[in-house]
Image: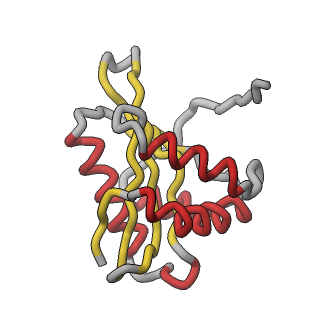
Amino acid sequence: MHVTPATDADIPALCALLAALFTQEAEFAPDRDAQIRGLHAILADDERGTVLVARDEHEVLGMVTLLWTVSTALGASVALLEDMVVAPDARGRGVGSELLDAALRCARDRGCRRITLLTDTANDRAQAFYRRHGFVASSMLPFRRLLN
């Protein structure tokens, strides 16, 4: 298994992974057209973010998406870990850890000082996974408003 940047050719496999992710998340539902638009936007602009994929030969086993922004609190670049998902049949094989390690290296190499992510409050497995990798729960409470 190895982790590489995603390409446009990976979009169908990434959409399948995102469908699995959004099926288990409380706030989101799969929308293939929206996922294709979002993936194209990230892949077309290195300044917007990056998508990394874990591969076993030619099969995509998982993905992680990082988006770049700036923190005025830190006065430095930071990353948002937007999506991370491992194919259900590839779970428990270290794919998630490899992806997260690659994401951390990528963010550090870009000069980021922090990575922030959201996970469902009921997703105890994901929270335990991120804690094992050094993440801590924030006292900040996310709020959202959809814009038309």
Location of residue 134 in the rendering, given as x and y in whole percent from the top left corner? 37, 52
At x 42%, y 68%, the residue is 96
Is 101 placed above or below 89 here? Answer: above
In the image, is 76 to the left or to the right of 109? right
102 lies left or right of 71: left
**How far across and how far down the image is residue 7, in percent?**
39, 57
Residue depicted at 53% across the width and 52% down the height: 83
Residue 114's quadrant in the figure?
top left
Q: How is the image coloured?
A: secondary structure
- Compared with residue 126, is residue 55 higher up or lower down, i.e. above or below? below
Q: Looking at the picture, does residue 108 appear above or below residue 30?
A: above
Q: Does 21 sit left or right of 73 as displayed?
A: right
Residue 90 pos. (x, y %): 48, 81
Residue at 69 percent of width and 59 percent of height: 22
The residue shown at (41%, 52%) is 51
- Tell whether 37 sits left or right of 144: left
- The location of residue 74, given as percent across then percent down, is 34, 20
Q: Nearer the viewer, residue 33 or 85?
A: 33
Image quarter in which the N terminus is found:
bottom left
